[in-house]
Image (cartoon, grey):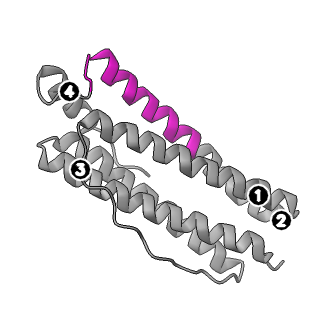
Amino acid sequence: MKMKEEILIAFNQALHGELQTAYDYEAMALWLRYNSLDGMAQWVQLQVEEERAHAQKMREYLEIRGAKVALSAIAQPRSEFSSALEVFEEVYKAEGRVAKVILSLRELALKHQDEGAAIFLNWYVTEQEEEEMSLQTILDKFALAGINHETKSGAAIYLLDKELGSRPNFS
C-alpha cells in the first residue's frame, strides 16, 4: 500500500528529529568530555548511536514502503551548558519531544488506516517510554546525590560519572 503524503511528510519530519537529536547529543557529549566527565560523555555518546540507529530504522522502513526519504538541514546544536545536571535535563526534554512526535505520527497513521505504519511505530513508542524512565532515574540520582546546577566537582559527581560510564552498549 502506498503511503499517504501526509504520513510521509510526518515520517520525514520524525526522521529529521531523530537526526537532530543525535547531533544535539553529540554536542552535549563533547561538552561533558571537555569538562572531564568522561563517564557521562560516554553515556550520552551511546544515546547518539541510538538516535542514529532509530533514524536508520525509520529510513529503511520508508524505503521498504517505496516512499521518498527527504532529508533536511540539521541545526547547529547548543554547545554550552551550566552543569552536567543541565545536560541530562536537556536530554530528558529532548526524549519527551521525540516521544510526542512519534505518538502524533502513530495517531496519524491510525487515522489514515495505515496499520503497517502504526505497528512499525509501536516499537518506537515502547523505546521512548524506556528512554524517559531511564533518564528520570538518572535525574533522581542527581537529586539523591545532592548534585545541583552549581555542583562542578566532588565525590558525588565523580561517582555518578563513574556509574554512568559503565552503561553497556545498546543492542
Q: Nearer the viewer, residue 34 or 44?
A: 34
Disc 4 or 2, which lies upstream in sequence? 2
Q: Amino acid at mark 1?
A: Ala
Near mark 2 (Cα within 10 A), the count class, few <14, some 14-19 or many ≥20, is some
* Residue where numbered disc 1 is placed: 118
By secondary structure, the bulk of the magenta-drawn segment is best described as helix
Mark 4 or 2, closer to the camera: 4
* Residue where numbered disc 3 is placed: 80
The CA span between labels 3 and 4 is: 15 Å
Which residue: 45% across, 65% down?
Answer: 19
* Residue where numbered disc 2 is placed: 114
Disc 2 or 3, which lies upstream in sequence? 3
The CA span between labels 3 and 1 is: 37 Å
Residue 157 image offset from top left, x and y in percent: 18, 27
The answer to which quarter of the image holds residue 61 is: bottom right
* Residue where numbered disc 4 is placed: 150
